[in-house]
Image (cartoon, grey):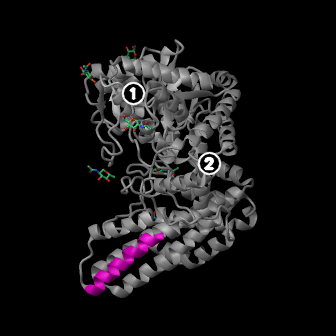
Amino acid sequence: PGVISDASRLSVPRFRYYQNVCTQSYSFVWWDWPRWEREIDWMALHGINLALAFTGQEAVWQRVYLSLGLNQSEIDEYVTGPAFLAWNRMGNLHTWDGPLPLSWNLKQLYLQYKILERMRSLGMIPVLPAFAGHVPKGLLRVFPRINATQLRSWSSFNCTYSCAYLLDPGDPMFQVIGAVFLKELIREFGTDHVYGADTFNEMSPRSSDPAYLSGISAAVFKSMTGARGRAGWVGAQGGLAGSQPDFWQPAQVRALLRGVPLGRMLVLDLFAETQPVYQRTESFFGQPPFIWCMLHNFGGNHGLFGTVESVNQGPFDARRFPNSTMVGTGLTPEGIEQNDMVYELMSELGWRQAPVDLRQWVADYATRRYGARNAGAAQAWQLLLRSAYNCSGLCVDHNHSPLVRRPSLHMAPQLWYNQSDVYEAWRLLLGAAGELGASPTYRYDLVDVTRQAAQQLVSDYYLEIQRAFQKGALPELLTAGGVLIYDLLPELDSLLASDGHFLLGRWLEQARATAASAKEAELYDRDARNQVTLWGPNGNILDYANKQLGGLVLDYYRVRWSLFVSALVESLTSGIPFHQEKFNQAVFQVERGFIYNGKRYPTQPAGDTLEIVRRIFLKYYPQAMRRGQ
Ligand SMILES: *[C@@H]1O[C@H](CO)[C@@H](O)[C@H](O)[C@H]1NC(C)=O
Ligand SMILES: *[C@@H]1O[C@H](CO)[C@@H](O)[C@H](O)[C@H]1NC(C)=O
Ligand SMILES: *[C@@H]1O[C@H](CO)[C@@H](O)[C@H](O)[C@H]1NC(C)=O
Ligand SMILES: *[C@@H]1O[C@H](CO)[C@@H](O)[C@H](O)[C@H]1NC(C)=O
Ligand SMILES: *[C@@H]1O[C@H](CO)[C@@H](O)[C@H](O)[C@H]1NC(C)=O
Ligand SMILES: *[C@@H]1O[C@H](CO)[C@@H](O)[C@H](O)[C@H]1NC(C)=O
């Protein structure tokens, strides 16, 4: 409350929202309380006053389903592994990598008590989950006459793991389930009367009839109010309209929004820095009010990128928009722990009356971040600002670099910036080591910028490999392939392994630490590996949540590249054409092999970051600058 009234005195928009439903899986999934505590501190320091609090809901659903008459195997069959729960909750996925052990539910329940207690004590409004209409198949056994229809398959999953059942909004059971769930939820956690629910995340409804769509949102909203009479709905409908613009014409968006009484819904314009929905819907038709959100990152990928100009202008354009109903700004990344600068910038803009002078801002940022003014570091940040962070037009919000993709002969690395700027920033940042070397944020950035330089170099080597193969030049192919596999990728891996923020071992051991038995630990370990690689049993959403982590670069990306280069060499020497399909089948075994390799990875950094960076720099900087021209 304090935060909100201060904000109104300053006449900045009232809300500063945080989280994407996917952040729960891509970043928070394995967190313990100390990590949550830090995050909530960070939220408080940045003035966040509205945030999702979706942890622990499976424990409540477990009870609800049992009370509705489902048996345990029917529940187990429905719920996914922990790393995929975000999509289970939205009806995109079921079954995959499950069942969820009951011990998971209990631990998450206790975590949620603490999360809520802390959020509330800091004046934040937690947004709790509500019933969106998706039901387990088992419900059809218990209630054979309910009117539920199967949604179409989601992404590249077939109905083994997708095509969830959606209850018809007119079916009386809709309100029963919604009310039972909320009653249990509130009994457990209390409520601030604000809920979130996503019925059509990346899925087309069965009908585009406006009456059907407003029926759905009316039913979801009614079930939110059922329990306590009053409720507000924070909906991501804005983002949904952006993801399937063909389906979500203005009439459909309006119908979905207008199913809810005026004044009771708040919409998140989820990806407003790139696809603002408010602009093509006359500010959501004047109702409901909306929050201008920066999504920035899909899948929590590493990689330097950002659209600083649109982030800097966007919220103010939205406020000035005719009859604007914008009431706040938000951060909605699918994954965090990357590109801190962009999040600091966006958070600060939520408190400002006008855009900042980006060049000045980033110079000050460098000083604040490293605790000292350093000319080289400030210059490095100017270069990063105008290059990697100044994406416009064909933008990336995802890392599609060849480094993190399954190799093929048809990749075209596309950069939206002058890569020499990054190499130059690398040189300048390294030059500041004498003065800033003791600062942990400096060391982190040095690793990250070196990582970006290495990623660019991988693209160069890839292009050389491609050219050499097409020319039939075996020596060139062996040279470029050799450097890539036996030097550059191992160097990148050792760089990452020298910093605790870039360790595969941390991700996996955190997953193991949430387990209550050795068997569960194995399950979580595999679940954690699958998310950052195959994303499904068959590589269904392959490398979407790619990360550059010490351990992963060596044992996953490098092994894949090694197989690729060998296949090309073999093709040149034998004269048998390279077959991508055949290669894909072989490489799938490698990818899967990584998930089941049974290896444990260190959770402590090893090696001297500065020494490693200097070594990579001496080896690669001269040619990097030559190539970058
Ligand atoms: C749950 O119900 C299904 C369908 O009747 C049945 O096949 C299964 O054996 C039951 N499981 C348990 C644990 O009772
Ligand atoms: C559906 O996908 C699963 C795993 O992705 C696969 O094992 C199964 O054969 C597929 N089923 C059909 C009918 O294609
Ligand atoms: C079932 O729901 C659909 C819409 O979801 C509706 O068109 C149909 O009339 C309903 N059937 C019954 C029997 O209520
Ligand atoms: C703003 O709202 C007013 C009152 O509803 C309306 O008359 C006017 O046309 C709107 N302006 C624009 C640009 O939509
Ligand atoms: C970003 O690029 C645009 C041109 O594409 C330029 O006008 C703008 O000044 C650049 N911004 C920064 C911060 O470098
Ligand atoms: C790219 O950046 C480098 C160093 O920052 C600069 O010297 C060069 O002129 C730039 N090239 C282009 C085409 O802008």
Residue occupying image coordinates x 64% and y 30%: 116
Q: Can you identify the residue that label 1 sits on?
A: 133
- Secondary structure beneath disc 1? loop
- Residue 568 falls in image quadrant: bottom left
**Residue 354: x and y, percent?**
57, 34
Magenta span covers which residues? 558-574
Marks 1 and 2, how far apart in space? 32 Å
Q: Residue at x 32, y 70 (%)?
A: 583
Image mark count: 2
Where is residue 387? Give x, y as percent.
Answer: 50, 57
Q: Residues within 10 Å of mark 2 (few under 14, many from 20)?
A: some
Side of 207 where 122 appears, left or right: right
x, y percent for residue 124: 64, 28
Which label is found at residue 516? Answer: 2
Q: Amino acid at mark 1?
A: Gly
Percent x, y for residue 254? 34, 22
Foreground label between 1 and 2: 2
Q: Amino acid at mark 2?
A: Ala
Q: Which mark is residue 227?
A: none
